[in-house]
Image (cartoon, grey):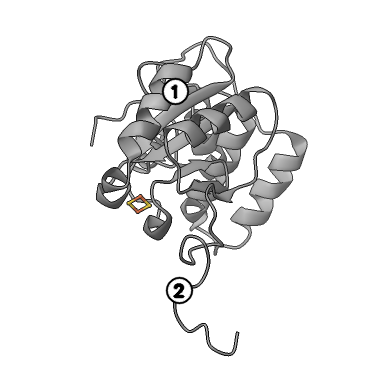
Amino acid sequence: MAIRRILPDAHGAFAFTEANVAFANAVIAKYPEGRKASAVVPLLWRAQEQNGGWVSEPVVRYIANMLGLSYIRVYEIATFYTMFNLKPVGEHLLQVCTTTPCWLRGSDAVVAACKKHIAPTQQTVSSDGKLSWMEVECLGACVNAPVVQVAADFYEDLDGASTERLIADLRDGKMPKPGPQIDRLNSAPVGGATTLKEGV
Ligand code: FES
Protein backbone atom coordinates (compact mmCIF):
# COMPACT_ATOMS: atom_id res chain seq x y z
CA MET A 1 0.00 0.00 0.00
CA ALA A 2 1.44 3.34 -1.03
CA ILE A 3 1.55 6.28 1.37
CA ARG A 4 -1.70 8.19 1.02
CA ARG A 5 -1.57 11.96 1.42
CA ILE A 6 -4.04 14.63 0.39
CA LEU A 7 -2.76 16.91 -2.35
CA PRO A 8 -2.01 20.25 -0.65
CA ASP A 9 -4.68 22.77 -1.65
CA ALA A 10 -4.36 25.62 0.83
CA HIS A 11 -6.24 28.13 -1.33
CA GLY A 12 -9.24 26.04 -2.28
CA ALA A 13 -12.63 26.34 -0.66
CA PHE A 14 -15.50 23.98 -0.07
CA ALA A 15 -19.02 24.18 1.29
CA PHE A 16 -21.93 21.80 0.88
CA THR A 17 -24.77 22.81 -1.40
CA GLU A 18 -28.10 23.45 0.29
CA ALA A 19 -29.28 19.97 -0.69
CA ASN A 20 -26.16 18.39 0.75
CA VAL A 21 -26.47 20.37 3.98
CA ALA A 22 -29.94 18.83 4.32
CA PHE A 23 -28.46 15.39 3.58
CA ALA A 24 -25.72 15.93 6.17
CA ASN A 25 -28.19 17.04 8.84
CA ALA A 26 -30.34 13.96 8.17
CA VAL A 27 -27.31 11.66 8.51
CA ILE A 28 -26.10 13.37 11.69
CA ALA A 29 -29.60 13.09 13.20
CA LYS A 30 -29.37 9.28 13.03
CA TYR A 31 -26.76 9.26 15.80
CA PRO A 32 -27.20 10.01 19.51
CA GLU A 33 -26.10 13.30 21.03
CA GLY A 34 -22.30 13.42 21.29
CA ARG A 35 -21.83 10.80 18.57
CA LYS A 36 -21.79 13.04 15.49
CA ALA A 37 -18.37 11.66 14.55
CA SER A 38 -20.11 8.51 13.33
CA ALA A 39 -21.41 10.47 10.33
CA VAL A 40 -17.94 11.19 9.01
CA VAL A 41 -17.76 8.53 6.28
CA PRO A 42 -21.12 9.26 4.59
CA LEU A 43 -20.40 13.00 4.77
CA LEU A 44 -16.95 12.60 3.25
CA TRP A 45 -18.47 10.39 0.55
CA ARG A 46 -21.10 13.00 -0.31
CA ALA A 47 -18.46 15.74 -0.26
CA GLN A 48 -16.25 13.74 -2.60
CA GLU A 49 -19.15 13.46 -5.06
CA GLN A 50 -19.79 17.21 -4.89
CA ASN A 51 -16.09 18.04 -5.17
CA GLY A 52 -15.57 16.40 -8.57
CA GLY A 53 -14.58 12.99 -7.24
CA TRP A 54 -11.86 13.75 -4.71
CA VAL A 55 -11.38 14.83 -1.10
CA SER A 56 -9.32 18.02 -0.81
CA GLU A 57 -7.97 19.74 2.30
CA PRO A 58 -10.86 22.25 2.32
CA VAL A 59 -13.28 19.31 2.22
CA VAL A 60 -11.59 17.76 5.25
CA ARG A 61 -11.69 21.06 7.16
CA TYR A 62 -15.35 21.64 6.25
CA ILE A 63 -16.43 18.18 7.43
CA ALA A 64 -14.31 18.48 10.58
CA ASN A 65 -15.99 21.81 11.43
CA MET A 66 -19.43 20.42 10.70
CA LEU A 67 -18.90 17.47 13.04
CA GLY A 68 -16.94 19.32 15.71
CA LEU A 69 -13.89 17.11 15.15
CA SER A 70 -10.25 17.99 14.92
CA TYR A 71 -8.94 18.26 11.38
CA ILE A 72 -6.49 15.37 11.90
CA ARG A 73 -9.26 12.92 12.83
CA VAL A 74 -11.05 13.49 9.54
CA TYR A 75 -7.72 13.51 7.67
CA GLU A 76 -6.89 10.10 9.15
CA ILE A 77 -10.19 8.63 7.95
CA ALA A 78 -9.93 10.14 4.45
CA THR A 79 -6.41 8.82 4.03
CA PHE A 80 -7.16 5.37 5.49
CA TYR A 81 -10.05 4.34 3.23
CA THR A 82 -9.08 3.93 -0.42
CA MET A 83 -12.66 4.79 -1.44
CA PHE A 84 -11.58 8.39 -0.98
CA ASN A 85 -9.47 9.90 -3.74
CA LEU A 86 -6.85 12.34 -2.49
CA LYS A 87 -6.08 14.14 -5.73
CA PRO A 88 -8.17 15.23 -8.73
CA VAL A 89 -9.64 12.49 -10.92
CA GLY A 90 -11.04 12.52 -14.43
CA GLU A 91 -14.78 12.76 -15.16
CA HIS A 92 -14.64 8.97 -15.20
CA LEU A 93 -12.32 7.07 -12.86
CA LEU A 94 -11.51 3.50 -13.90
CA GLN A 95 -10.67 1.37 -10.88
CA VAL A 96 -8.73 -1.57 -12.27
CA CYS A 97 -8.54 -4.69 -10.13
CA THR A 98 -5.09 -6.27 -10.30
CA THR A 99 -5.41 -8.75 -7.43
CA THR A 100 -4.40 -12.36 -8.19
CA PRO A 101 -7.58 -13.74 -9.91
CA CYS A 102 -7.84 -10.66 -12.14
CA TRP A 103 -4.10 -10.74 -12.79
CA LEU A 104 -4.24 -14.43 -13.76
CA ARG A 105 -7.12 -13.65 -16.12
CA GLY A 106 -5.34 -10.80 -17.90
CA SER A 107 -5.49 -7.56 -15.92
CA ASP A 108 -2.04 -6.68 -17.33
CA ALA A 109 -3.74 -6.07 -20.69
CA VAL A 110 -6.37 -3.89 -19.00
CA VAL A 111 -3.67 -1.83 -17.31
CA ALA A 112 -1.78 -1.55 -20.61
CA ALA A 113 -4.89 -0.16 -22.33
CA CYS A 114 -5.31 2.40 -19.53
CA LYS A 115 -1.67 3.42 -19.79
CA LYS A 116 -1.94 3.82 -23.53
CA HIS A 117 -5.27 5.62 -23.77
CA ILE A 118 -5.60 7.50 -20.46
CA ALA A 119 -2.22 8.25 -18.91
CA PRO A 120 1.07 6.34 -18.52
CA THR A 121 0.82 6.50 -14.73
CA GLN A 122 -2.16 5.80 -12.53
CA GLN A 123 -3.96 8.59 -10.66
CA THR A 124 -3.12 11.00 -13.45
CA VAL A 125 -5.89 12.83 -15.27
CA SER A 126 -5.83 12.41 -19.06
CA SER A 127 -4.89 15.49 -21.06
CA ASP A 128 -8.55 16.06 -22.03
CA GLY A 129 -9.60 15.87 -18.37
CA LYS A 130 -12.07 13.09 -19.06
CA LEU A 131 -10.46 10.01 -17.61
CA SER A 132 -8.11 8.68 -14.97
CA TRP A 133 -7.35 5.20 -13.73
CA MET A 134 -5.97 3.49 -10.66
CA GLU A 135 -5.13 0.00 -9.50
CA VAL A 136 -7.31 -1.39 -6.71
CA GLU A 137 -7.49 -4.59 -4.70
CA CYS A 138 -10.18 -7.25 -5.17
CA LEU A 139 -13.55 -5.80 -6.17
CA GLY A 140 -15.36 -8.96 -5.12
CA ALA A 141 -16.31 -10.05 -8.64
CA CYS A 142 -13.44 -12.49 -9.23
CA VAL A 143 -15.63 -15.01 -11.09
CA ASN A 144 -15.87 -12.43 -13.89
CA ALA A 145 -12.21 -11.39 -13.80
CA PRO A 146 -10.66 -9.16 -14.93
CA VAL A 147 -12.87 -6.40 -13.64
CA VAL A 148 -12.96 -2.58 -13.84
CA GLN A 149 -15.25 -0.43 -11.72
CA VAL A 150 -16.50 2.92 -13.06
CA ALA A 151 -18.61 4.82 -10.51
CA ALA A 152 -21.14 2.19 -9.33
CA ASP A 153 -20.85 -0.02 -12.44
CA PHE A 154 -18.69 -3.10 -12.95
CA TYR A 155 -17.27 -4.01 -16.38
CA GLU A 156 -16.31 -7.66 -16.37
CA ASP A 157 -14.53 -10.35 -18.42
CA LEU A 158 -12.41 -7.65 -20.02
CA ASP A 159 -9.38 -7.95 -22.24
CA GLY A 160 -7.20 -5.34 -23.92
CA ALA A 161 -9.58 -4.73 -26.85
CA SER A 162 -12.75 -4.47 -24.76
CA THR A 163 -10.99 -2.14 -22.32
CA GLU A 164 -9.99 0.09 -25.24
CA ARG A 165 -13.63 0.13 -26.40
CA LEU A 166 -14.78 0.98 -22.87
CA ILE A 167 -12.32 3.87 -22.65
CA ALA A 168 -13.34 5.20 -26.08
CA ASP A 169 -17.05 5.05 -25.21
CA LEU A 170 -16.58 6.84 -21.90
CA ARG A 171 -14.49 9.48 -23.61
CA ASP A 172 -17.30 9.99 -26.15
CA GLY A 173 -19.85 10.46 -23.39
CA LYS A 174 -21.53 7.08 -23.92
CA MET A 175 -22.30 4.85 -20.96
CA PRO A 176 -21.51 1.31 -22.11
CA LYS A 177 -23.61 -1.54 -20.76
CA PRO A 178 -22.04 -2.81 -17.55
CA GLY A 179 -21.53 -6.48 -16.70
CA PRO A 180 -19.74 -9.17 -18.70
CA GLN A 181 -18.18 -7.90 -21.92
CA ILE A 182 -18.26 -11.38 -23.51
CA ASP A 183 -20.98 -13.87 -24.40
CA ARG A 184 -21.94 -14.66 -20.85
CA LEU A 185 -25.00 -14.15 -18.66
CA ASN A 186 -23.89 -12.73 -15.31
CA SER A 187 -21.45 -15.35 -14.00
CA ALA A 188 -22.92 -18.33 -15.89
CA PRO A 189 -20.58 -20.37 -18.12
CA VAL A 190 -19.36 -18.72 -21.31
CA GLY A 191 -21.74 -19.57 -24.19
CA GLY A 192 -24.52 -20.84 -21.90
CA ALA A 193 -25.22 -23.64 -19.46
CA THR A 194 -22.99 -26.73 -19.59
CA THR A 195 -24.65 -28.78 -16.82
CA LEU A 196 -28.15 -29.43 -15.46
CA LYS A 197 -29.53 -28.99 -18.97
CA GLU A 198 -32.17 -31.73 -18.85
CA GLY A 199 -35.67 -30.40 -18.57
CA VAL A 200 -34.56 -26.86 -19.47
S1 FES B 1 -9.47 -10.35 -7.83
FE1 FES B 1 -10.38 -8.91 -9.16
S2 FES B 1 -12.43 -8.91 -8.53
FE2 FES B 1 -11.49 -10.25 -7.12
- At label 1, counting other C-alpha atoms closer than 10 Å, the crowd grade (few under 14, some 14-19, many 20 or more) is some
- Residue type indicated by callout 2: Thr
Cα distance, mark 1 to mark 2?
A: 46 Å
For badge 1, the amino acid type reads: Lys
Q: Mark 1 highlights which residue? A: 87
Numbered circles on residues, count: 2
Instruction: From this view, report whether residue 156 is shown above or below residue 141.
Output: above
Is the N terminus in the top left, top right, bottom left or bottom right quadrant? top left
Residue 169, compared with residue 25, is above or below; it is: above
Left or right side of 26 for 53: left
92 or 103: which is nearer to us?
Answer: 103
- Please name which of the two marks, 1 or 2, marks the residue nearer to the observer: 2
Please tell me which residue is depicted at 43% across the width and 46% down the height of the picture. 147
Please give the label number shown on residue 194.
Answer: 2
Of residue 56 and residue 28, the one placed in the foreground of this image is 56
Most foreground residue, 182 or 75: 182
Rendered location of residue 183, percent (x, y): 54, 54
Disc 1, SS? loop
What residue sits 52% from the left and 9% below the top?
127
Residue 118 seen by the camera:
no
- Which of these two is toward me, 81 or 76? 81
